[in-house]
Image (tube, rainbow, N blue to C red):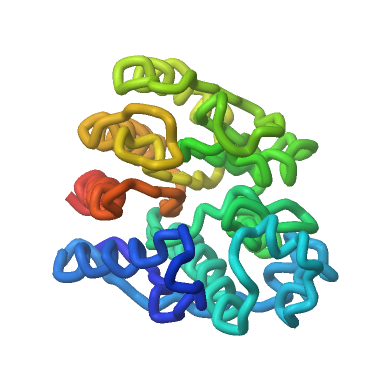
Amino acid sequence: MLRLFYCDHYDMGLPPDHRFPARKYRLLREALTGDRRFEILPAPLASPEEICEAHDAEYVRQFLHGELPPAAVRRIGFPWSPALVLRTLASVGGALAATDAAEETGFGGALMGGTHHAFWGEGSGFCVFNDIAVSIAGLRMRGWGWRVAVVDLDVHQGDGTAALFADDPDVLTLSFHGRNNFPFRKQVSKIDVAFADGTGDEEYLAALEEHLPRVWDFRPDFVFYQSGVDNLLEDKLGKLSLSHAGLAERDRRVMTAARRYGKPFVLLLGGGYADPIEATVQANVNTYRTAATVWAG
């Protein structure tokens, strides 16, 4: 049984007309509930101390107390509220709990997270704290996971993650992303693969076949998978043209190779902004059911 953590029991405090599709988290959890291959648990709250292992302490304090400058709040993209603080702590806590589960059993998953646009001292692009970086810091505090691979297949470059680990030779950051998409000022990952608008399944999967073996050649102790589905054809922000079948094949190839490699694996949700949102949810469901097929049989 695969352990998954959710945080949609905390409201994000967004106004009704906000463009971020927060209800996708609840819809995903409901779609997976009843599948006996999953144990679906509420995420614990991360502590400020855990978050400060990967972020500037003053930035963390300002966010928690509602003291960020207006420009910093706009860069994140969410209006600040006490509800957002709790939701953010639960989101990071879910990633930490999934990391613990992977350390214990070989697999852990979170029905949220993959907040790869957050930097050391600022948030960006709907990301307050970088849950991948916080999780890696937690592993290292316990003397675990010195060599880590981050496989980021969200359509938007994992710029915050790339910057946080730019000078760390023991963290491999791989990002597959749209060349002409946010963030418009790209960082330098250890492996960057940028796609033109309209790229479809065949070209994308060929690139994955070429570059994914480099992850295992790195010999990581731990693998994080940011499994964003915003490269789906129906996505409003993606600009790529992957099909549901193409995304499912992407996930199958990544997870089958990771299972064969045999090190702990953490699955994080990433982005998805399809219209209708049910298309995003279906793609997410396919990702987690692929994980169940690969790990739980």
What residue is rendered at 32% in x and 37% in y? 251
Quadrant of res 41: bottom left
As drawn, is 115 to the left or to the right of 201? right
Please indicate, yes or no, whether residue 139 appears anywhere in the rendered image.
no
Q: Above or below — where is 8 with respect to 27?
A: below
Quadrant of the image occupied by residue 50: bottom right
Judging depth in this view, the residue of 215 and 16 nearest the camera is 16
User: 74 left or right of 68?
Assistant: left
Residue at 75% in and 39% down: 168
Q: Residue at x 54, y 22 (%)?
A: 194
Which of 89/295 is in front?
Answer: 89
Which percent across, then down, holds residue 36?
15, 66
Residue 276 is situated, as x and y percent measured from the top left of the image, at: 27, 51
Q: Give the quarter of the figure containing the N terminus.
A: bottom left
Q: Position of residue 109 (x, y in %)?
A: 39, 59
**Above or below, comparing residue 175 to residue 49 in the picture:** above
On the image, the x and y values in percent for residue 234 come to 30, 38
Instruction: Report if residue 215 is visible in the image.
Output: yes
Closest to the observer, 216 or 135: 135
Q: Is residue 111 above or below residue 257?
A: below
Q: Nearer the viewer, residue 229 or 47?
A: 229
Question: How many discs mark residues in the rendered view?
Answer: 0
Q: Give me the residue at 38% from left, 62% from top.
A: 111
Q: Which residue lies most toward the right here? A: 58
